[in-house]
Amino acid sequence: MVERISPLGEAFRPGTYGNLVDGPGVTLTEATPAAIAEASAFPGSAEALLGAIETVTGLSLPATPGAGAVGGDAAAFAIGPGRHLVAGAEGLSASLQAAVALDIGTVTDLSHGRAALRIAGPRAEWVLAKLFALDFSPAAFPLSEGRATAHHDIFAHIQRTGGEQFDIYVFRSFARAFWEEICAAAAETGYEVR
Amino acid sequence: MLIPCPHCGPRDLSEFSYQGDATRTRPDPASTDMKAWHDYVYNRPNPAGPHREYWQHAGGCRTHLLVTRDTLTHEVQAVAFARAALNDGAGKP
Ligand SMILES: [Zn+2]
């Protein structure tokens, strides 16, 4: 197995930064899971694909736009009609590939192609709202749901993985630049890197 | 301009790529009718008013959409998935 190193490199510097008058408003961490896969259904097979995802991860996903689920060791959410990002433990992609029959859809292993950055804390929605033209309020973006969007040319798949926590999946080669972007956006609220 | 994507909801224009006039019909690929091909490739009615056009939600769910847009006001009058089968039961409940 090829060992992955963090794409954040020297840009990842644990500590507290920015405006700390009220303490750090957000915590920033790298949350890249061992395995990331995109599971896509062929036309008419969206429900069957959701069944295969549930078989492998135990996550039950409604067939509605943006729907997602967060479990103990896996998370999944819709990134398009019949298309899902699935994240989890080592071996997840192979298990999904085995569970998704050839006539149902495809599974693409993205473990080495994406990085997940996590922002958590009382000001997380505020900081993200600076970067993306999305409504991050809990009413519009409930727990476990996902969104596919972009920050200029950096595509981002975002899932709310906690009450005040979001995981942002970006192309690995953009991860360091985007990490620095988040840090700059969070300077106003103060942030802790850990 | 906002385009209400059937999967993602209303999103900024910057997330979309224009994919061309949706009123054209391609001639039979075996056709050698030069006028028909010329019209298909080059001639556009360029209406001042409602226009059917394809957009891709490239910075989002990546689907292709069929949009009816008023070229005078940029009002988006209708949006659907270009792949018709996706429109059954589409959208958030
Ligand atoms: Zn969309």
Image (spheres, rainbow, N blue to C red):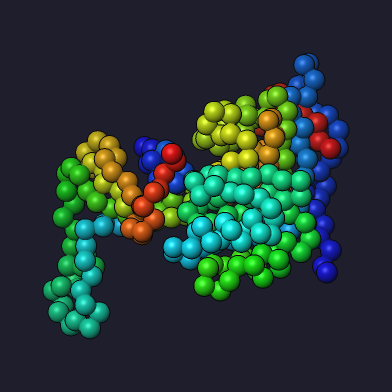
- The spot of residue B11 in percent (x, y) is 44, 40
The answer to whether residue A134 is above or below residue A156 is above
Q: Could you tell whether A67 is left or right of B43 in the image?
A: right
The answer to whether residue A88 is above or below residue A91 is above
Q: Is residue A173 visible?
A: no
Q: Could you tell whether B8 is left or right of A129 in the image?
A: left
The answer to whether residue B5 is above or below residue A6 is above
Query: Along the line of sight, which residue is nearer the eye, A121 or A66?
Result: A66
Residue sitting at x 33%, y 49%: B80
- The spot of residue A143 in percent (x, y) is 63, 35
Residue sitting at x 51%, y 49%: A63
Residue sitting at x 61%, y 61%: A52
Quadrant housing residue B91: top left
> What count of labels does the image hold?
0
- The spot of residue B56 in percent (x, y) is 40, 54
Residue sitting at x 69%, y 60%: A56
The answer to whether residue A130 is above or below residue A61 is above
Quadrant housing residue A53: bottom right
* The C terminus of chain A - image quarter: top right
Q: Is residue B47 visible?
A: yes
* The N terminus of chain A - image quarter: bottom right
- The spot of residue A174 in percent (x, y) is 66, 52
Q: Could you tell whether A24 is left or right of A41 in the image?
A: right
Query: Along the line of sight, which residue is nearer the eye, A84 or A110?
Result: A84
**Outermost residue, top side:** A21
